[in-house]
Image (cartoon, rainbow, N blue to C red):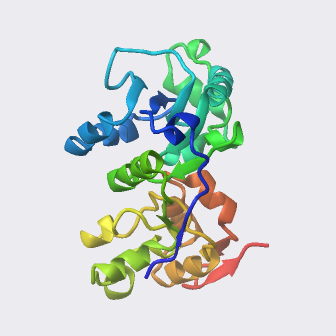
Amino acid sequence: MQDTTAPRIVWPDRIVRGEPPTLAVWKFASCDGCQLSILDCEDELMAVAERVAISYFPEATSGMVDGPYDVSLVEGSISTDHDAERIVEIRRQSSLLVTIGACATAGGIQALRNGRDVDGFRSIVYAHPEFVDTLATSTPIVDHVSVDLELRGCPIDRTQLLQTLAAVLDRHALRLPTTSVCTECKERDQICVMVAHGEPCIGPVTQAGCGALCPAFHRGCYGCFGPMESPNVPALRRRLALLGLDGEGVDRLLHTFNTAAFARVDGGAVGCGDGLAEERP
């Protein structure tokens, strides 16, 4: 059985009273994929909509209701000064704040710019870079305000979203996986693509939650759900080196949707050219 964790949720007063809670969905720097995952719930979303008052969700409706809000779902990373100010106000108006997706929980793929020459990028990409207002970093919501719950993924898993909303509405414990994608491969009797086919895969250090989607199609995991609890990244680097990947090749695997999150847990190793890995100092 998978190890799971039950995040502590403080129920908004309206939910405690048995009244329909107000729900707001917010967007920051992102591709809108997680918001579309909400809409993709289709029939289930209609059932949820009967039990909540959707007060702010520009992706779905032009109807807007001023806060405060019982539950806020926040997609996207903080990439501008305006974003940093706006998330503080959203936090102030939200009894329960849930971040959804890799951008909101880890800075997203746009965090690849962190620590690099952002002004240089801007001058190359845009005809009028002076019009582009951006921070040098892309950071997760939790770096700016307190967060009650995080839903990982790029995009989020619709089942986890529905489980979260059900837990909030019915005031019961929510259990999210903390083990690796490897456990999901075993649960669906999926042959290990790394062992059987030599396919580079970061599933051993990635949090479960996707149902081992990529390995089910004979492809290595891309790390959409970010690092699992206590990942052994140096050991994975050594294994990937045996498959012929040097340090830069492994970096490319880790530096995608959750690059900042993997950077925080990467003990580090670089290829030394002989099929093994050499530990970074």
For image coordinates 53% across by 61% down, the residue present is 254
The residue most toward the front is: 17
Q: Is residue 218 visible?
A: no
87 up-or-down from 148: above or below: above
Identify the image quadrant of residue 89: top right
Q: Nearer the viewer, residue 30 or 36?
A: 36
Q: Residue at x 50, y 85 (%)?
A: 242
Tell me where residue 23 appears, x and y as whole percent.
Answer: 45, 31
Image coords of residue 37 (percent x, y): 32, 43
The residue positioned 32% from the left and 87% from the top of the image is 196
229 versus 161 height, above or below: below
| Nearer to the camera, 111 or 40 | 40
On the picture, is 125 further left or further right than 232?
A: left
With 52 as the anchor, is 98 left or right in this view? right
Judge from the rendering whether residue 93 lies leftward or rightward of residue 143; answer left or right.
Answer: left
In the picture, the quarter occupied by the N terminus is: bottom left
Question: Looking at the image, which residue sits at the far left?
Answer: 43
Q: Nearer the viewer, residue 140 or 264?
A: 140
With respect to residue 157, does 267 lie above or below?
Answer: below
In which quarter of the view is residue 185 placed?
bottom left
Q: Quadrant of the C terminus?
A: bottom right
Whether 185 is drawn above or below 43: the answer is below
